[in-house]
Image (cartoon, rainbow, N blue to C red):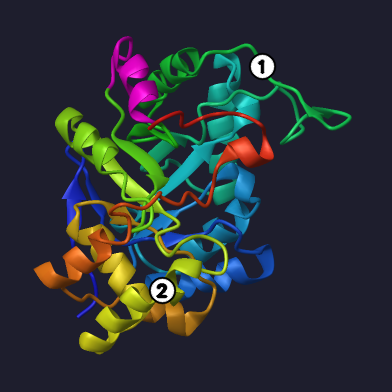
Amino acid sequence: MSFGKTATLNTGATIPLVGLGTWQSKRDVVKTAVKVAIEAGYRHIDAAFIYGNEKEVGQAIAESGVPRSELFVTTKLWNNAHRPEDVLPALKKSLANLGLDYVDLYLMHWPVAFKSGPAAVPKDGDKILFEDVDFTETYKAMEALIETGLTKAIGVSNFSVGNLEKLLQVAKIVPAVNQVELHPELPQQELLDYCNSKGIHLTAYSPLGSTDSPLIKRDEVTKIAEKHKSSNANVLIAWGRQRGTSVIPKSVTASRIISNFQDIELDSDDQQVLKSITEGQETHRYCDPQTFWGVNVFGSN
């Protein structure tokens, strides 16, 4: 049977544990992908301004025939709109793109502020231009969004324990969600435990190991999939879901979108095999802005 499992956020709202990710989904195919997903039973769609495909995602939602109230839609504030005065206009722009009156969750995409303006990644030559705005100031402006009704909840993405601790010292609204990279090669147990202790739900992006899904090819995953007569992707999705995190695998292939929504249950032996991937080994982060922006976001967390 397909997923119908949810988690309850600190707002009281529920978030479906399996959603469709749309990062790197090209405009000409993402609309069909979202429509296939919704038809297959998905009710959680993850979007972002920087993905450049919010309009097509919104068109698919509009044409799905599913009542808006039955869907959980997330989008994200990009780095070039971190000044407090830029936050509300950025959300309104995303809503216009999506063709929606509100989103269920609005996330700060990164704790990194680029120079305000139209450029997604502003540069002077090869040098990225940053804005002197602390993410706590940006989050304070996001807190004011709740009263507008344009988003039902706010949260963050790519936040370490250290950055969450800094944020919670001044935040009036505890983030509902922290969306981060999570998979058996990067389990982030300390972060999961910390967020659980603070009532912050974790959503796992790149659950299959990011571009070209290298994690899927591991022998450990293949053997577990064969044991359950399932797919390697289903093993990784189940791993995330059984930890209590929501999982947003990305695909634009109809058969994979449908297959990813099939539920399996990993047993304790399976869990130990997947846990052993990082025992005595270095973890593997596929998405680290140190490599493409020269910014140390994660530190030791």
Q: In the image, residue 233 lies at what x, y percent?
A: 37, 74
Amino acid type shown at disc 1: Glu
Q: Is residue 205 above or below residue 194?
A: below
Which of the image's four quarters has the C terminus? top left
Q: Place residue 293 in its image quadrant.
A: top right
Q: Place residue 12 in its image quadrant.
A: top left
Identify the residue at horizontal 59%, vertical 43% (top origin).
49
Residue 168 within the magenta-colored segment of the rendering = yes
Q: Closer to the observer: label 2 or label 1?
A: 2
Left or right: 276 as drawn, with respect to 297: left
Q: In the image, residue 275 lies at what x, y percent?
A: 24, 59
- Secondary structure, mark 2, is loop
Q: Is residue 233 above or below residue 71?
A: below
Magenta stretch, residue numbers = 160-173
**Res. 131 visible in picture:** yes
Identify the residue at horizontal 84%, vertical 32% (top origin).
126
Q: Which mark is residue 218?
A: 2
Q: Which residue is mark 1?
A: 131
Q: CA distance from mark 2 to mark 1?
A: 41 Å
